[in-house]
Image (tube, grey):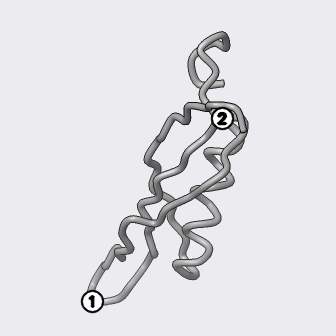
Amino acid sequence: MDNTVAKVITVIGSSSESFDKAVATAVAAASKRVKGVHVADVQKFYVHVEKGKVVSYRARVRMAFEYDPKLKKGR
């Protein structure tokens, strides 16, 4: 196995429906910006509340992707 280096980013996804969809939103958004996302670690779940009701579900997600110093930033 070759030696590799991964870069880690943190993103927050949200959904008006569920925590699962909040995580999926975060992963999908990050995958559009960076290539090779290979692991996601959900760090925290929380909700946004208005007038005593939950209006959105949020997930803070850490994701790792293969780091290639030859590529431009964020790719």
Q: Residue at x 53, y 50 (%)?
A: 63
* Residue at mark 1: 52
Figure check: 61 above or below 57: above
Q: Closer to the N terminus: mark 1 or mark 2?
A: 2
**How many marks can you see?**
2
Q: Amino acid at mark 2?
A: Arg
- Percent coordinates x, y for residue 16 in the rendering: 54, 76
Tell me where residue 12 sits by quadrant: bottom left
Tell me where residue 21 sits by quadrant: bottom right
Q: Amino acid at mark 1?
A: Gly
Left/right of residue 23 with respect to residue 51 in the rendered view: right
Q: Residue at x 49, y 62 (%)?
A: 41
* Residue at mark 2: 33
6 and 23: which is toward the camera: 6
Q: What kind of element bears circle 1?
A: loop
- Percent coordinates x, y for residue 50 in the rendering: 31, 79
Figure check: 34 above or below 56: above
Figure check: 59 above or below 9: below
List the single residue furthest toward the front. 1
Quarter holding the C terminus?
top right
